[in-house]
Amino acid sequence: VRVGELSRRSGVAVPTIKYYLREGLLAPGEATAANQADYTDEHLRRLRLIRALIEVGGVSVAGARQVIDALGDSGRAPLELLGDAQAAVAPRRRPDRDTPVWRGARARVEALIAERGWLIDPSSIAIDLVADALAACESLQVTEVVNALDMYVDAAGRIAEREVRAVLDRPDPSSRLELVVLGTVLGEALFSALRMLAHQHESARQI
Amino acid sequence: VRVGELSRRSGVAVPTIKYYLREGLLAPGEATAANQADYTDEHLRRLRLIRALIEVGGVSVAGARQVIDALGDSGRAPLELLGDAQAAVAPRRRPDRDTPVWRGARARVEALIAERGWLIDPSSIAIDLVADALAACESLQVTEVVNALDMYVDAAGRIAEREVRAVLDRPDPSSRLELVVLGTVLGEALFSALRMLAHQHESARQI
C-alpha cells in the first residue's frame, strides 16, 4: 500500500512515518516510482511496535531504535535482546550510586539473588535498578516497602515465570523476540496501571 | 542548618536547592540574616522526597510540585491524594483513545471491575491507563498478555492490599500521606526492577 494508506491503517500521521523512515526505525518501502513506495503488512506491524514502545512504554525515539536494531540482528541471543529491551525501557534519570546507602542496597540485592539461587548476569542493569529503588526507600526510611521485599520478589517471580513461558511457547524465533520486547513494555504498563486500580479499591475498602 | 550543610546532607547541589525554592517545591528556610536562612530536618526530608519523585519515579518538576502541594493541603482526603500521586507518576504520553479498539478495552476494564466488585471512582485515570495497555496489546495481537490478565489482577490486588494496610498502620496523618506518595513511586520502581531481574532468571532457567 501507499504511505497514505499505511497512515490511515496505523493511525500514525504521514510526517511521523517519514520521520521514522529517516531515523531508520522503519525500513524503506519498495520503490514503485519516483517518490512513491509500497508498504506491506510487515511495515504496519513494525509501526505498531514503535508506537507501543514510545506511547505505552514511554521509550525515547533513540531507545526505540536500539530495540528495533537489536530485533533485526539475527545474531543476537534472546537473553541479550532481553537486556537491550530492559535497558531501553529503564528510567533515564539515575540517582547518585556513589554512596554507602546505595552500596549497601546493591549488596542486599546480591544477597537476595544468591539466596533465591537466581541465575543473573552480574552486569545486568536490573541489579542496579533494584538497588536504586531500595536505596531510595532506605534513605527516606520507607521501611514498609523494604520489609515487603519478599512479597514483591515472589510476585515478580510468578509473573516472570509465566511471561517467559509464553515467549517460549511461540513457534518461530522472530515472533519470540518480538514478544520479549512487547511483553517487557506492555506487561509492565498493564501491571503498573492495575496496581493503581487496586490501590483505589483497597483504599476505598480499608479506610 | 545553612544551605551548604543542607546540600551536603542531602547530596543535592546548592543551585538545585535554590531552584526548588524558587519553584515552590521547598518551603523557604527561616531568615537569620540578609541572604541567609536556616533549614531544618523537615527540609532535608522534603528534599529527599522530591529527589525520590524525580529520580526514582521519573516525575517531572511540575508533577512533583503537584504532589507536594497536595501533601500540604490538609483538606485533601487520602483517596484524593492517591489520585493526585497516580496522576503525577502516570506516563505523560497518551495513545489515541478515540478508536473502537480502545473503547472495547475500556469496556473490558469496566467489566473486570464489576466482576471483582472493586470500588473504583469511574473518573479514576487508572481505568484509562489499564485500557491504554490492553488496547496496545490487542492492536499488536499480544494475546499472551491479554490472556494473563487475571494473573496480573491477582498479583496487583495482593500487593495493593498489603501496601494500603501499611499506610493505615502509620500512626499520624501526615506520615500516612507521605507513604501514599512514596509507596506509589518507590513500590512501583522496586517491583518493575524486580520483574526485570526475574525475567533474566527465568530466561536463563527456561531456555
Image (cartoon, coloured by chain):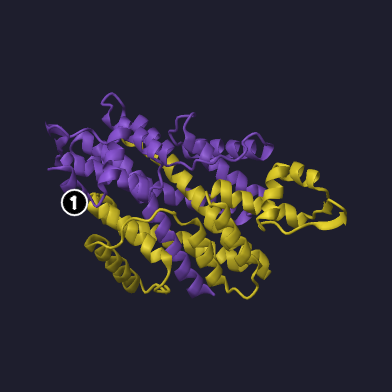
Chain colours: A yellow, B purple
Mark 1 surroundings: few (<14), some (14-19) or many (≥20) residues within 10 A? few
Q: Farthest residue in the top direction? A: B75
Q: Secondary structure at mark 1?
A: helix
Q: Farthest residue in the right direction? A: A33
Residue B5, above or below B126: below
Q: Farthest residue in the left direction? A: B32
Q: Which residue occupies the foreground of this view, A126 or B129? A: A126
Q: Which residue occupies the foreground of this view, B195 or B41? A: B41
Q: Would residue B166 be visible to someone looking at this image?
A: no
Subunit ID for the residue under disc 1: B
Q: Which residue is mark 1?
A: B9
Say whether residue A40 is left or right of residue A112. right
Residue B205 coordinates in the image, percent (x, y): 48, 74
Say whether residue A99 is left or right of residue A195. left
Q: Amino acid at mark 1?
A: Arg
Residue B81 coordinates in the image, percent (x, y): 34, 32
Q: Which residue occupies the foreground of this view, B133 or B17? A: B17
The residue sitting at 46% across, 36% down in the picture is: B117
Residue B63, above or below A111: above
The residue sitting at 46% across, 41% down in the picture is: B90
Residue B105 coordinates in the image, percent (x, y): 61, 40
The residue sitting at 47% across, 48% down in the picture is: B153
Q: Farthest residue in the front direction? A: B34
Q: How many marks?
A: 1
